[in-house]
Amino acid sequence: MANNANWQPVTELIASHSGHRLQVESVTPVSGGCINSSFKLTMTNRKSYFVKRNAITLFAMFEAELLGLQSLADTQQVRVPSPIGTCRSHEHSFLVMNWISIGESNRSTHETLGRELALMHRFESVTDFGYDLDNFIGSTPQLNRWNSSWKDFFLLQRLEPQLRIAKSNGYGTHFRNSDKLLINVEGLLNDSPKPSLIHGDLWSGNFMVDLQGNPILIDPAPYWSDREAEFGIVTMFGGFESGFFDAYQETLPFEPGFEQRLQAYQLYHYLNHLNLFGGSYLGQVQKIISKMG
């Protein structure tokens, strides 16, 4: 039997959600994350939950992730773990979700993911760009103040903050012409795209597969965006089969000039990786900037 005192806030949250007061039968650490500690909690009724834990100071990160999961689920176009809620103790903050047993990916999985992602991007709800609260890309704060101009939103709330962080991290000599860079990026972007809800951090490690072979999106950093910005990180590390891109294109084709605009969206994520993980990403940042002139 697990030490229930350590998990009291979680058991109270589960009791409030389910209507049944249960105890924790077992706690199993789950690997894979680099920011949070993760666990599989199995209760005395044999139902299991996925729990993320971190310092109490990072409670806002879990609150943002909870809202992100709910936002993606609300489109009814993609699958996400069912969020139970957030809670905290004196030392820790927690995010609780239903447990999903992992299955095996196949070609159909990637095709389904591409089609469902396109349908989510086609979902219409707002007229401006932004989100209901600021959230996080990795552990980096991500601003989401509403703006009717996509160009202004992307330049002021995506690239400029990352450039400021890079300069404060000692990379200032590499970004002396940041004003020119922003002008070049502005010239690449679409003038008036339709706001689409994007996952925001969709690399291959942020989707999993259930026992039925269905793709499940996890760890979102969503906002209402030009849908093409989704592919800034989708295309960074690989892991998505050709069937994913084919199914997306069949459902919602890319517009002319996508390959050029993609450079701007990759730059945002490479800058973030530079700021989070250090100089091994500087070469990729410089390579993209050199292509922009």
Image (cartoon, grey):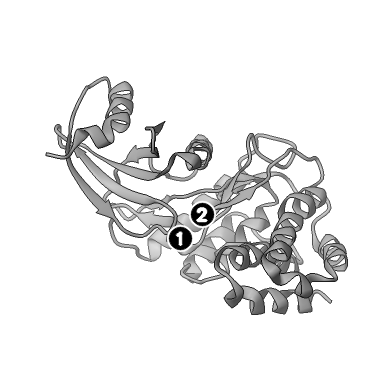
Q: Quadrant of the C terminus?
A: bottom right
Residue 228 occupies which quadrant of the picture?
A: bottom right
Left or right of 145 in this view: 204: left
For this orientation, the residue located farthest to the front is 90
Tell me which amino acid carries mark 2: Arg
Tell me which amino acid carries mark 1: Glu
Residue 24 occupies which quadrant of the picture?
A: top left
Say which element carries label 2. Answer: helix
The number of callouts visible is 2
Return the residue nearer the eye: 7 or 152.
Answer: 7
Say which element carries label 1. Answer: helix
Residue 72, numbered circle: none
Residue 102 occupies which quadrant of the picture?
A: bottom left
Q: x%, y% of residue 79?
A: 43, 45
Left or right of 47 in this view: 127: right
Return the residue nearer the eye: 269 or 259.
Answer: 269
Q: Residue at x 62, y 68 (%)?
A: 274
Residue matched to label 1: 111
Left or right of 255 in this view: 3: left
Q: Residue at x 77, y 48 (%)?
A: 153
Residue matched to label 2: 115
**Residue 259 visible, this orientation:** no
